[in-house]
Image: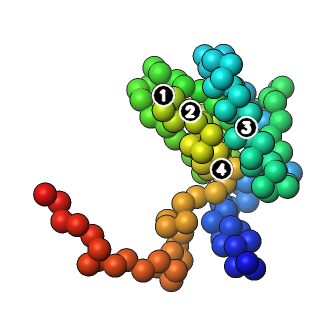
Amino acid sequence: TNEQPKAAIRSVEPYAYRRWPYARIPYLVSSDYTPNERAVVAKAISNIETATNCVKFVPRTIEQDYIYITPDYERGYACYSNVGRMGGQQLVKMQGDCVRESAMTHELLHAVGFGHENQRPDATQYITINYQNIRPVS
């Protein structure tokens, strides 16, 4: 529908300094990943490049701002990414059962600049909570 592209635009990082110049995102993949895990990263990158037709992930050479896709076990278990370009080395931390295509695509979209739809400032205009459908904590 015509609403889908508008909704996607509204969920993108609004601050220019958090956007990746020319929609090019330098990336580095940790050598700690297995070949199968590296294939998951490649598929997630391909998903985003194909779906957006404008974002391009490029292997890092000398760029100061880049994403580093890593399991980073030293900092505990977690799977996350900041939203948009932060500057310098930016972790996209993916480990364990997070290293699957859907989760990897999700976190890489955060690095691109997409946040969660339900956290947009205008979310309450589009989301209705049916409190009667919420089960009490037992």
Name the residue nearer the viewer: 14 or 116.
Answer: 116
Answer few, some or many: residues within 10 Å of disc 3's Cα (few below 14, many 20 plus, some between 14 and 19). some
Residue drawn at 62 percent across, 20 percent down? 33
Q: Earlier in the sequence, mark 3 or mark 2?
A: 3
Residue drawn at 58 percent across, 36 percent down? 100
Say which element carries label 3. Answer: helix
Viewer can see residue 86: no
Tag 1 near tag 4, CB within 8 Å: no
Residue 46 x/y as whole percent: 78, 42
Answer few, some or many: residues within 10 Å of disc 1's Cα (few below 14, many 20 plus, some between 14 and 19). few
Q: Earlier in the sequence, mark 3 or mark 1?
A: 3
Which amino acid does the dot numbered 3 rest on?
Lys
Q: Earlier in the sequence, mark 1 or mark 4?
A: 1
Residue that mark 2 sits on? 99
Answer few, some or many: residues within 10 Å of disc 2's Cα (few below 14, many 20 plus, some between 14 and 19). many
Marker disc for residue 43: 3
Using the image, determine if residue 6 lies above or below residue 92.
below
Say which element carries label 2. Answer: loop
Q: Nearer the viewer, mark 3 or mark 4?
A: 3
Tag 3 near tag 4, CB within 8 Å: no
Residue that mark 4 sits on? 109
Tag 2 near tag 1, CB within 8 Å: yes
Mark 2 vs mark 4, CA separation in Å: 15 Å
Using the image, determine if residue 36 lies above or below residue 103.
above
Residue 23 x/y as whole percent: 82, 51
Which amino acid does the dot numbered 4 rest on?
Leu
Which amino acid does the dot numbered 1 rest on?
Gly
Residue drawn at 60 percent across, 45 percent down? 102
